[in-house]
């Protein structure tokens, strides 16, 4: 019997020739194998020590995942649903994961598991239950270990490593499962231009993060009315708009010592075309655009910057310490508490924000999956959460955030203007 194997992503019909000799005659038998598409799931699990983002890739789409264990459930060979459980930080999340895994095993569902960062801390009390389900290595998972599991070959396959586990798995075309373990939740919201902050002034002619006057001009015309600028200091203590000095030097072909002086900063243009902004330029622009609001990044001294800006009533300062937030509150400066101090708050986070008149939160959109409960509490309290890290992960652009995450969060830092704000129903 002769098998002809072609290396391709699509398996073509294969002629299988079998011959039987009868006296002097040869009788060939020709069989045609079925055509099916070769589909793969790529799992990349990285522990905390690997210092890499864990991902999975399926049908040319790559998804970055958050801390804990992510379950990937197959409806069929081309449709999946997934959810991340923060099994490091929450016993309730670990118990919810166990419930889902139990249901999946009982229903003979096809699925995979993928760990990121640290996933084991809240699994200890569930070890016996996990063992009884067949998750032997998961039940013994140690802190800061990488882990993957799948049952796409009919039985549970597990791999563990102290750093990383990378695995490519073939997905059968025979999978069919209508049941949804992670139904999407719909959040209604009213479209409004104040849901969109122009990140670093917004994209200008396809270029991001310029913090330039040209970016402000172009994106104001497109519809933005809230503009974020990164505020840093020159060597002679002048406040200017730039993401960081290394990026500014690349943008301007500057080769001198960093930080530059104010004079060196202001005379150079980004890519030879776009005008940089110091405080005089920032104040002039916002004076000429009285319906525009400034959101700051990088600077953490609310009093000094508010005194330097033309109108503190049109100023929202993202702040990076509890002390800075409290200082802003004392002087009636609008504060946006950043992710790190917010998540580090002990006790009642919502009460702290209310006491200090904080009505804005800045949070990475990568945290949405693990902080849904907090986001719902913030939404209920009327506190507006704006997510950044838009366009950082493959496929997670403005359109994705608009269609999947706004409603749970209030708005986003966007590089591009969202032109269609008519639809009210989006899914998470």
Image (cartoon, rainbow, N blue to C red):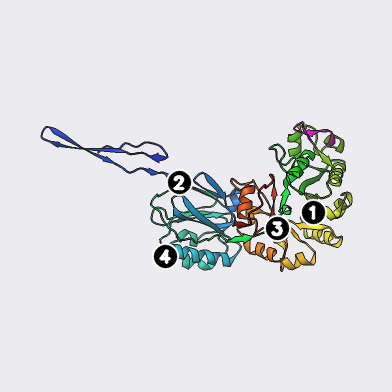
Label 2, label 1: how many angstroms apart (C-alpha)?
46 Å
Q: Is residue 370 left or right of residue 247?
A: left
Q: How many marks?
A: 4
Mark 3 / mark 2, whichever is N-terminal = 2
Q: Which residue is mark 1?
A: 317
Q: In x, y percent, where is residue 58?
A: 50, 47
Indicate the quadrant where residue 382 lies.
Answer: bottom right
Q: Which residue is mark 4?
A: 106
Mark 2 / mark 4, whichever is N-terminal = 2
* The magenta stretch spans residue 64: no
Residue 145 versus residue 236: which sits nearer the camera?
Answer: 236
Q: Which residue is mark 3?
A: 385
**318, above or below 211, in the image:** below
Q: Is residue 410 left or right of residue 265?
A: left
Q: In x, y percent, where is residue 155?
A: 39, 57
Indicate the quadrant where residue 85 lies.
Answer: bottom right
Determine the secondary structure under disc 4: helix
Residue under the image location 41 percent in, 55 percent down: 176
* The magenta stretch spans residue 269: yes
Determine the secondary structure under disc 3: strand
> What segment carries the magenta color?
266-274
Question: Mark 2 touching mark 1, by CB under 8 A?
Answer: no
Determine the secondary structure under disc 2: strand
Question: Mark 3 touching mark 2, by CB under 8 A?
Answer: no
Q: Which of the labelled discs sits on residue 40, or is there none?
A: 2
């Amino acid at each position: 019997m002769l098998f002809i194997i072609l290396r391709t992503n699509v398996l073509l019909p294969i002629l299988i020739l079998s011959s039987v000799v009868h006296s002097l005659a040869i009788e060939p038998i020709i069989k045609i194998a079925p055509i099916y598409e070769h589909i793969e799931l790529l799992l990349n699990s990285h522990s905390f020590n690997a210092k890499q983002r864990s991902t999975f890739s399926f049908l040319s789409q790559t998804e970055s995942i958050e801390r804990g264990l992510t379950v990937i459930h197959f409806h069929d060979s081309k449709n999946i649903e997934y959810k991340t459980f923060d099994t490091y930080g929450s016993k309730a999340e670990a118990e919810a994961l166990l419930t889902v895994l139990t249901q999946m095993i009982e229903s003979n569902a096809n699925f995979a598991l993928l760990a990121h960062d640290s996933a084991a801390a809240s699994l200890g009390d569930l070890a016996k239950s996990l063992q009884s389900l067949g998750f032997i290595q998961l039940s013994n998972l140690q802190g800061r270990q990488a882990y993957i599991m799948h049952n796409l070959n009919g039985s549970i396959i597990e791999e563990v490593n102290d750093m990383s586990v990378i695995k490519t798995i073939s997905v059968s075309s025979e999978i069919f499962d209508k049941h949804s373990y992670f139904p999407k939740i719909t959040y209604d919201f009213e479209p409004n231009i104040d849901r969109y902050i122009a990140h670093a002034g917004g994209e200008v002619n396809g270029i991001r993060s310029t913090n330039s006057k040209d970016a402000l001009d172009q994106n104001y015309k497109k519809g933005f009315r809230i503009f974020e600028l990164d505020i840093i200091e020159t060597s002679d203590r002048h406040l200017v708009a730039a993401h960081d000095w290394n990026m500014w030097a690349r943008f301007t072909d500057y080769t001198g010592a960093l930080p530059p002086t104010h004079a060196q900063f202001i005379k150079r243009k980004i890519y030879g075309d776009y005008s940089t902004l110091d405080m005089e330029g920032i104040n002039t622009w916002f004076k000429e655009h009285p319906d525009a609001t400034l959101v700051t990044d990088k600077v953490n001294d609310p009093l000094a910057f508010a005194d330097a800006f033309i109108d503190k009533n049109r100023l929202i300062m993202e702040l990076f310490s509890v002390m800075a937030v409290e200082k802003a509150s004392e002087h009636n400066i609008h504060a946006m508490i950043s992710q790190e101090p917010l998540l580090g708050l002990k006790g009642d986070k919502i009460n702290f924000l209310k006491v200090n008149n904080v009505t804005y939160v800045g949070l990475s959109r990568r945290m949405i999956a693990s902080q849904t409960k907090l986001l719902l509490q913030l939404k209920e309290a009327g506190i507006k959460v704006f997510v950044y890290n838009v366009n950082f992960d493959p496929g997670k652009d403005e359109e994705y955030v608009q269609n999947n995450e706004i409603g749970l969060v209030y708005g986003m830092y966007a590089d591009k203007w969202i032109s269609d704000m008519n639809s009210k129903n989006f899914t998470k």
